[in-house]
């Protein structure tokens, strides 16, 4: 699935402020390598249904065997392993007989201590990897997972490793064992160990995705093998909001253009981001924040939400809006399946100009039936002239006024809003009163 930097930013997938990042919300990796792999997943959502379904199956297996998924492995474990290979040590004796081992212990105290300490962490790691690989014998695993498990078993084949993990965690090693295991790990196991650490990064990233799904009650979407774009979501909500209101969404080629209206703060932007976020998570193979979701595979998501001036280039807000729309049109002209999200089109010009520009863009976009569009606007008037287009679905967010106070129920309704609340807000915030006192 194609997603550009602007869309990643608009959907708050990666942010400099972690509290508002989708990635930081879902990241439950236990190791640095796992986090790097999770970032890789988030940067490359799938465009193939089979890969999505395979990932969904893997996450379900992890949920089922959560407590067997390498519980003895931590980031500290892997750090000790890597440091053992990076730290210069005096040569361990080739023989691990008691005399040679004790002499090494006496003459190379610090190196012996580091070796003994490192062995315990290698043992924890190996136990954890064996525990994960053993799941393959308990249930049917997708090919990708099964192949990795088979590689793990092969890499952990040497008898020395099996002897090492027969020692109970915390059981003291005699000097001969320290020399024997240390020699093998350092001189014969390095390449295998580094490969296993890399494989565990993949296991850890999947673990994070599965545990995030469990914690936030995410539901696996069903992918339909259709040639046309389709989304149907029940009780969708935004994952980053603590008390989010849910929505039902249905879009297909017959209703592929949502014309969204409502006052500022009524919920338009949140709704747009909710749909985009759900589709993004679905294409990672993850669950979505909803009661249920059915969708086709999409080729990409494009958004036009947080447009900014470019002071360095001397480009205005309106110019950047136009450029973003231009690039969007070029991109979706490939007749592939896109979800296009546009929030408050043409805010950077006067009302009459914005209405003309918006009408022109909308009339052009609705010709494209291979993509789905959600467009919000404060220009309610243009809705009337678009009513006769059968594939436009008019939705709005209501604002209520109770005792002079604004209430936002955040409920998505059919129709076009007619709320005009700017002056009311001006009065409520006592701006009018302050001006009268000047």
Image (tube, rainbow, N blue to C red):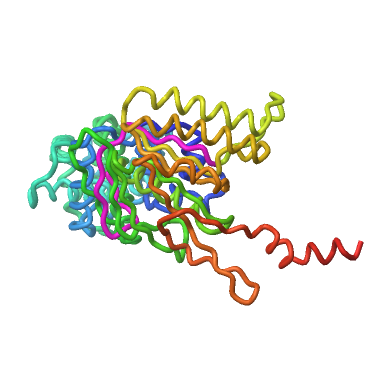
Question: Which quadrant does the N terminus fall into?
Answer: top left
Foreground of the two, 227 or 121: 227
Q: Is residue 294 magenta?
A: yes
Rendered residue at 53%/59% (across/down): 266
Residue at 58% across, 38% down = 355
Query: Image check: 25 left or right of 56?
Result: right
- Rendered view: 390 above or below 131: above
Q: Is residue 225 magenta?
A: no
Along the horizontal axis of the image, is 358 left or right of 329? Answer: right
Residue farthest to the bottom, as pictured = 403
Which image quarter: residue 90? top left
Splitting the image into 4 quarters, where does residue 186 fall? top left
Identify the magenta region.
285-305
Closest to the observer, 148 or 40: 40
Determine whether 252 is above or below 415 in the image: above
Q: Nearer the viewer, residue 297 or 354?
A: 354
- Residue 388 seen from this side: yes
Q: Position of residue 187 (x, y in %)?
A: 28, 30
- Image point 25% across, 58% down: which residue? 169
The answer to whether residue 101 shows anywhere in this view is: no
Give the image quarter of residue 247: bottom left
- The image position of residue 210, as x and y in percent, is 28, 52
Tell how many labels.
Answer: 0
- Viewed as shown, does residue 412 lie left or right of 436? left
């Amino acid at each position: 699935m194609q997603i550009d930097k602007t869309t990643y930013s608009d959907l708050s997938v990666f942010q400099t402020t972690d509290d508002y990042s989708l990635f930081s919300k879902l990241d439950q990796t236990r190791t640095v390598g796992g986090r790097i792999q999770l970032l890789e997943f988030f940067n490359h959502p799938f465009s193939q249904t089979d890969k999505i379904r395979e990932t969904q199956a893997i996450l379900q297996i992890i949920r089922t065997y959560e407590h067997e998924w390498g519980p003895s492995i931590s980031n500290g474990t892997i750090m000790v392993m890597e440091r053992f290979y990076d730290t210069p040590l005096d040569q361990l004796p080739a023989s691990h007989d008691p005399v040679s081992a004790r002499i090494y212990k006496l003459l190379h105290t610090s190196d012996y201590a580091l070796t003994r300490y490192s062995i315990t962490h290698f043992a924890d790691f190996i136990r954890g990897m064996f525990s994960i690989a053993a799941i393959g014998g308990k249930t049917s695993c997708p090919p990708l997972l099964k192949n990795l498990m088979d590689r793990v078993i092969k890499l952990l084949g040497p008898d020395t490793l099996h002897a090492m993990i027969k020692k109970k965690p915390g059981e003291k090693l005699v000097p001969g064992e320290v020399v024997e295991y240390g020699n093998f790990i350092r001189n014969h196991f390095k390449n295998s160990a580094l490969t296993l650490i890399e494989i565990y990064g993949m296991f850890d990233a999947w673990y994070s995705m599965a545990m995030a799904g469990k914690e936030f009650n995410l539901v696996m979407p069903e992918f339909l093998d259709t040639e046309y774009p389709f989304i149907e979501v029940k009780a969708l909500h935004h994952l980053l909001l603590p008390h989010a209101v849910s929505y039902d969404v249905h879009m297909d080629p017959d209703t592929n253009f949502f014309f969204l209206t409502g006052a500022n703060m009524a919920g338009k932007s949140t709704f747009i981001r909710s749909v985009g976020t759900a589709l993004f998570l679905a294409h990672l193979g993850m669950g979505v924040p909803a009661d249920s979701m059915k969708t086709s595979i999409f080729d990409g998501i494009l958004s036009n939400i947080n447009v900014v001036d470019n002071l360095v280039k001397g480009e205005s807000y309106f110019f950047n809006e136009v450029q973003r729309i231009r690039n969007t049109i070029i991109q979706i002209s490939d007749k592939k399946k896109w979800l296009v999200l546009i929030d408050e089109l043409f805010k950077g010009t006067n009302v009459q100009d914005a209405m003309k520009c918006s009408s022109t863009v909308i009339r052009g976009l609705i010709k494209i039936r291979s993509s789905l569009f959600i467009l919000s606007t404060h220009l309610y008037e243009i809705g009337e002239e678009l009513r006769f287009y059968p594939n436009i679905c008019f939705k709005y967010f209501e604002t209520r006024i109770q005792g002079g106070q604004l209430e936002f129920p955040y409920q998505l309704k059919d129709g076009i809003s007619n709320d005009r609340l700017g002056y009311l807000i001006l009065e409520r915030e006592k701006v009018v009163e302050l001006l009268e006192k000047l």
